[in-house]
Image: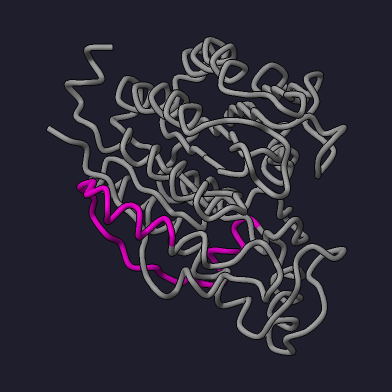
Amino acid sequence: MTCKTGIVKGEGLLSYSFPPPHPFNSDRVRRFWAQLKTEGVRVDLISPLKAEREVIELFHRKEHVDFVKMASDHGYGFLDQGDTPAYRGVYEAAQFVVGSSVQSVEKIMASELDHSFNPVGGLHHATRDSSAGFCVFNDVGVAIEVLRKNYGVRRILYADIDAHHGDGVFYSYESDPDLFIFDLHEDGRYLYPGTGFRSETGKGAAEGTKFNMPLPPGADDENVSENLSKLEAIVDKCRPEFIIFQCGADSLAGDPIAGLNYSTNSHSMVGEVLHRAAHRYCSGRLLALGGGGYDPENCARAWCAVVRILAQSRENLTKK
């Protein structure tokens, strides 16, 4: 029996698209949806849904939400230091991203789905009080807060293989002992945001719950494979009640912004570990998020690789 896997698809997600020549645009998602249709993977389609302001403010400061709304209404300027431009409707577009991730969480927790994938989710650079690195609001942080507030879920595993360190998630939960983080990324000495060093393992009671795995430029599938045992150990230590997988495609060879050299095998390998873990520890509860990726073809291939893993039968999992 295949896993019931949801995919968020609809015009609302396409609105989160910065004006040309910005690399974060809707071409990435359109190409993924087209590839998924070609491959014929059996999935359930979910329409995008806007998050209400009070949901966004479970993670973000009110002042930041006010600022984004104002900039969106005016339609000019930047939401950060120059990476994330404002445009008319960017606030509503970001509502769709956050709302779609939250809706996915709700459907998983209601057992309507085993897993869900939001291709525009995974905006992991935004902090509680600022936008950053193409990320207006941090849907990961909001999803975590929804799981805690509405469902009483405490132990959460966040795994991130985007080429860039997920600093907005990491530092927001650096002192949280119940959020385990595995972040495999290009070394911050060479790539934005310049963080995520191996020595950063959590603070206070959270010491030893955070794992940064910086890789040198040019790192490939072999480097990912070498770190799978660490991921498995983190999973067993965490024994998660819910898993969030940020599977950014900017780690694939040929991305115009990052410098890693993965193939889609890396996404499949990590996806398999997390898929097995989800069924072993948390009744399959796994939310996957697209994250970065600035070559639309790479996005389509990497994200489809993850969806294929999530949609495979549970019988296949038990055989491995």
Residue located farthest toward the left when viewing the structure as drawn: 1
Instruction: State whether residue 212 is above or below residue 76.
Output: above
* Side (left or right) of 116 relative to 154: left
Residue positioned 42% across, 21% down in the render? 273
In the depicted structure, whether residue 141 falls above or below residue 1: below
The one nearer the camera, 298 or 87, is: 298
The extreme front residue here reads 254
Count of numbered marks: 0
- Residue, x 82% and y 79% (percent of image)? 77
Q: Position of residue 256 (x, y in %)?
A: 70, 49
Q: Is residue 69 left or right of residue 154?
A: right
Identify the image quadrant of residue 78: bottom right
Q: Where is residue 73 shown, x and y percent of the image? A: 69, 88
In this picture, which residue range is highlighted in magenta?
A: 31-59
Is 56 within the magenta? yes
249 or 166: nearer the viewer: 249
Task: Tell me: residue 189, above or below residue 5.
Answer: above
> Is 154 displayed left or right of 73 in the figure?
left
- 280, 75: nearer the viewer: 75
Question: How are the residues colored?
Answer: one colour
156 lies left or right of 313:
right
Query: Where residue 279 appears, x then y in whole percent?
Result: 30, 25
Q: Residue furthest bottom?
A: 74
Residue under the point 37% across and 70% down:
10
Q: Was residue 120 drawn as part of the magenta stretch in this picture?
A: no
Image coordinates for residue 310, horizontal then vertical, percent = 32, 36
Query: Which quadrant, please, contains the N terminus?
Result: top left
Quarter the C terminus occupies:
top left
State the residue at coordinates (49%, 47%).
Answer: 289
